[in-house]
Image (cartoon, grey):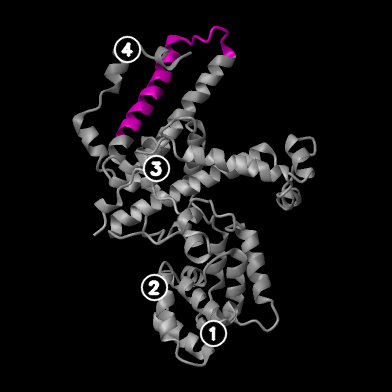
Amino acid sequence: MSESQMLDEPQLRAAMKMSRDVRAAAATMGPEEARMLVSMYYNWQQERIRAQGRIRSALEDDSPHETIAHFLGVFEVLERQAKGALERFALGSPEGEWAMSITGIGPVLAAGLMAHIDIDRSPYAGSLMTFAGLNPNRKWIGAEGSRALIKSAFAIEGVTEAGAVYHIAQQANRRMSELYKAMHGEDYVELPPERYLEVLNALAGHDVSSLWLQCQIENSAYIDNSFNLALERLEIKPGLGYRQLYDGVKVVKTALTKYLARRPWNADLKVLAWKIGESFVKVQSRESDVYGKMFAAAKEKYNAANDRGEYADAAEEKLDTTNIGKETIAYSWYSEGKLPPAHVNERAKRIAVKMFLSHYWEVLYTIKYGREAPPPYVIQHMGHDHNRYIPPPNFDKSRWLR
């Protein structure tokens, strides 16, 4: 049964009509309204596909009763109207316009990105990857894991409260300031830069004002990052610095437990990122495609490394941490020290999606602040070749730089 069979053309045209007021209002939706409409779109789409599947399995000729066909057509109409409204919303902002210029990104995906991503909550590209669930080091430990981690940290012999929190931060891959802010909520008062400098001076045994200023300039996204960089250059162990920095600051275990138990990413954005990856795979053969070709190149590279046995440790860890049936194809791959094709495929997709999200963040940053976005962390601080930087396609920075 094709979608065109659901409603005849006169019915479809009548149902598809939206008032001018509704069309105009779509451009003025806020993030919350856009999130709701994106969710409704995917729900309608899922229900229509599910119903079509039931019909195909139940009817030999694939021809539903006209009453059923009518209501399936209603779902189709709702999808089209929602898609049109989301396109109006996305094209109302420069970042949405840029996103829709990318092959594989349609109005629903573009609107979903705009609805879920706030540059103020993601001050650098890495924080956006974490928010989208693409940071492999950020694990969801849940309530039980949270309680166990906190109990073990405070049970360390001779540990101070600040030392215990530092241990938790390391184990859970969190920033110290993030944990203290979570514990105190609206009452949290951020430590001033002067406090960081005071600790650095005390640990170094001399004035390091110039070094501290330089570290703040080089790594301005989070003050913790600047502090880490200063400690590294002074060859001081981070734990020592943070224990002194937060010495005497109150620890609220109940609030800390609750915070660590929460999912550390946005579930809806993670699903959206997966859908974006699937879309890039589908468009990789188009001449205008950019990110699908990145997926294909990454997949080829990963397959070659997999054949050489370079992922044996990852395969062993997967077997140790995941209950995989011994009768499955996946188990046969992992047991031979290799990743199954589906695993390699997902890794390659993440490469393309992370590059796209990094570009989306750069576009947002440039538009909002009118200046060049800082280089990605791996290029700026991990010695990667600056020539590997790839600018966002279809984006004229000069239009926005002030």
Q: Residues within 10 Å of mark 4 (few under 14, many from 20)?
A: few
For the residue pair 325 and 202, the one nearer the viewer reads as 202
Residue 132 falls within the magenta-colored stretch:
no
User: Is 375 positioned to the left or the right of 28 in the image?
Assistant: right
> What residue lies at 31% left-to-right and 31% top-to-bottom?
84
> What residue lies at 73% left-to-right and 45% top-to-bottom?
308
Q: Earlier in the sequence, mark 1 or mark 4?
A: 4
User: Where residue 353 sits in the image (x, y, percent)?
Assistant: 49, 45
Q: According to the image, label 3 marks what residue?
A: 112
Label 3 to label 2: alpha-carbon separation: 33 Å
Q: Which stretch did the figure color magenta?
A: 58-85
Label 3 to label 1: alpha-carbon separation: 43 Å
The image shows residue 338, relative to residue 81, as above or below, that is: below
User: Where residue 313 sits in the image (x, y, percent)?
Assistant: 73, 53
Q: Residues within 10 Å of mark 3 (few under 14, many from 20)?
A: many
Q: According to the image, label 4 marks what residue?
A: 9
Label 2 to label 1: alpha-carbon separation: 23 Å
For the residue labelled by badge 2, is the local secondary structure a helix, a strand or a loop?
helix
